[in-house]
Amino acid sequence: MTAEEDLNERIGVLQEEIEQLRNAVVSHAVVDQAIGVVIAAGHLRPEQGWEVLKDISQHTNTKLREVAEYVVQGAHCRWLPDEIHAAFVSALRRAKEG
């Protein structure tokens, strides 16, 4: 492999890593916003908000990032998919009981 090919390969790897980091930052922001929505909706502590999101994700077999996106969008349009809504209500109930 020539030095130029090696450099081009390294650039490609770094560009991919940058894209992954950008996606992670966006996902983290959405998750943080969703935690805020859960806290406000359920009158919970921040750590309970995180647990509620994880609970919904596990009970619906949906990625946490996707659950967070639904919750944030749902706060604006007052609608969640039926499965997410049911899991949300159940998770809030469990968080308040626990």
Image: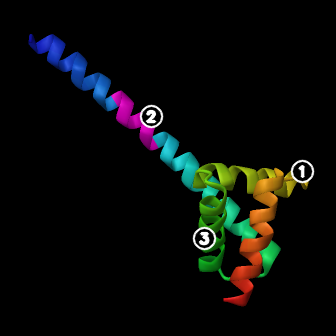
Depth check, mark 2 against mark 3: the one in front is 3
Residue found at x 60% / y 70%: 50
Q: Nearer the viewer, mark 2 or mark 1?
A: 1
| Residue under numbered circle 1 | 77
For the N terminus, give its image quadrant: top left
Does the magenta stretch mainly form a helix, a strand or a loop? helix
Q: Using the image as rendered, state which of residue 55 and residue 32 is in the foreground.
A: 55
Q: Is residue 41 visible?
A: yes
Residue 40 to residue 86: above or below: below
Q: Is residue 87 magenta?
A: no
Q: Amino acid at mark 3?
A: Trp
Find the distance from the CA under tag 1 to the CA under tag 3. Answer: 22 Å
Instruction: Give the left or right position of residue 61, taking residue 96 as reference.
Output: left
- Closest to the observer: 60 or 77? 60
Looking at the rendering, the stretch of residues picked out in magenta corresponds to 15-21
Ranked by sequence position, the earlier of labels 2 and 3 is 2
Of callouts 1 and 3, the N-terminal one: 3
In depth, the one of 14 and 68 nearer the eye is 68
Residue 85: image quadrant is: bottom right
Crowd around label 3: few <14 · some 14–19 · many ≥20 (10 Å): some
| CA separation in Å, label 2 and label 3 | 25 Å
Q: Residues within 10 Å of mark 1 (few under 14, many from 20)?
A: few
Is residue 44 something that shows in the picture? no
Mark 3 secondary-structure assignment: helix
Q: Which residue is mark 2?
A: 19
x, y percent for residue 39:
73, 74
Q: Is residue 95 above or below residue 27?
A: below
**Image x and y of residue 67, in percent:** 67, 54
Cα distance between the residues tagged 2 and 1: 30 Å
Q: What amino acid type should be assigned to the residue bearing mark 2?
A: Glu
Q: Badge 3 is on which residue?
A: 50
